[in-house]
Image (spheres, coloured by chain):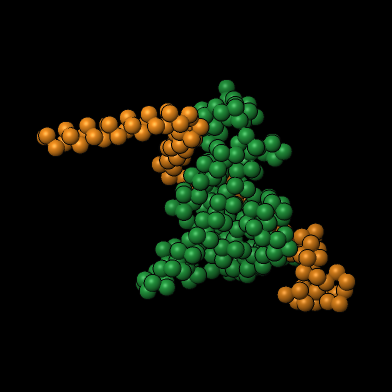
Chain colours: A orange, B green
Amino acid sequence: MAHLVWKKLNMSADSPMATVTDLAEYIEMGGLNEEFAWLRAQVADLRDSIIEPPAVLLPAIYGELDRMGRAQWLRSSPKWMAYAGGIAASAGALALATRTRRS
Amino acid sequence: MEVEMETLIEAAKDGDRAAFDEIVRRTYRNVFSLAVRLTGNEDDASDVTQEVYVRAFKAIKRFRGDAQISTWLYRICANCSSTFLKKRSRHRHAELDSGSPIADPHPDADPTLQVEGSDIRARVDQAIRQLPERLRSVVVLRDAYDLSHQEIAEELNITESAAKVRLHRARKNLQSALGGLGDARDGTPGVEEAEHVS
């Protein structure tokens, strides 16, 4: 590719600049940018073109943050609170199972 | 009156969840739009957008305010999308190896799909969607979202040189895909050329 670009620029590929890095920098600094001026302007316009997200996305993000917040709280809580939470959850599950069996 | 974004950011840094929720509300449409352009479809973009805000919430204390928060979120989005696409690529390879039928779940990527309508922006958008993922991400981040080569390289985990070379290839591909819609010489679209684009 480098040779093709240098050929286009009517320069020698033996130039001391002719490394891929230098060439890429040259391109970015304006060497070939004007060739893409119209294209770049069109692509830049896309930023203002909002793709409307699905209605469920915002609640889903908040839900994800809620879950993460709870997990962080558990991690940062003293050990006895985590154990107490675990015991309470187990007791609740046991009570539910017992009631289900009775009914 | 709407609270300033800077105030919200400071509050979110202090652990104010409501402030962070407001930041999400103000920015998620833009982040989602970028995610669609990077991943190529809305389902994947929804997953990526959720991940962006999870990461942002974890890292908000480290946000220094050197750049706008939107740019910071775009960088996270670029990184999340890159990770997501790599995982998806591996998953697809595994599926193919296991003998699953080959089916493209993204009909938008079909190169034979004809672009409808005459709107230039829609054509550019469509052409970008049809670029290979590695080229698409670079041109979108650079030309649409104005990230620097260094930022792109960091988030996509590639070298700056690779980012520049990919950008050049992406632009060439786009120009070719648009079939000379814009006049390369004077930087304005040629009407006659535009009419000949199918």
Answer left or right for B105 relative to B185: left
Image quadrant in which you'd find residue B104: bottom left
Q: Residue at x 70, y 64 (%)?
A: B162
Quarter containing the C terminus of chain B: bottom right
Residue B48 or residue A94, whichever sits in front:
A94
Answer left or right for B166 relative to B54: right
Q: Residue at x 80, y 59 (%)?
A: A29
Answer left or right for B195 relative to A29: left
x and y percent of residue A73 in the render?
A: 48, 32
- How many callouts does the rendering have? 0
Q: Residue at x 72, y 53 (%)?
A: B150
Name above or below for residue A5 compared with residue B64: below
Residue B133 or residue B109, whichever sits in front:
B133
Q: Residue at x 16, y 33 (%)?
A: A99
Among all residues in the image, which is located at the extreme left? A103
Name above or below for residue B85 compared with residue B65: below
Residue B154 or residue B120, whichever sits in front:
B154
Q: Does residue B8 appear in the picture of this structure?
A: no
Residue A84 or residue A11, whichever sits in front:
A84
x and y percent of residue B28 in the render?
A: 53, 41
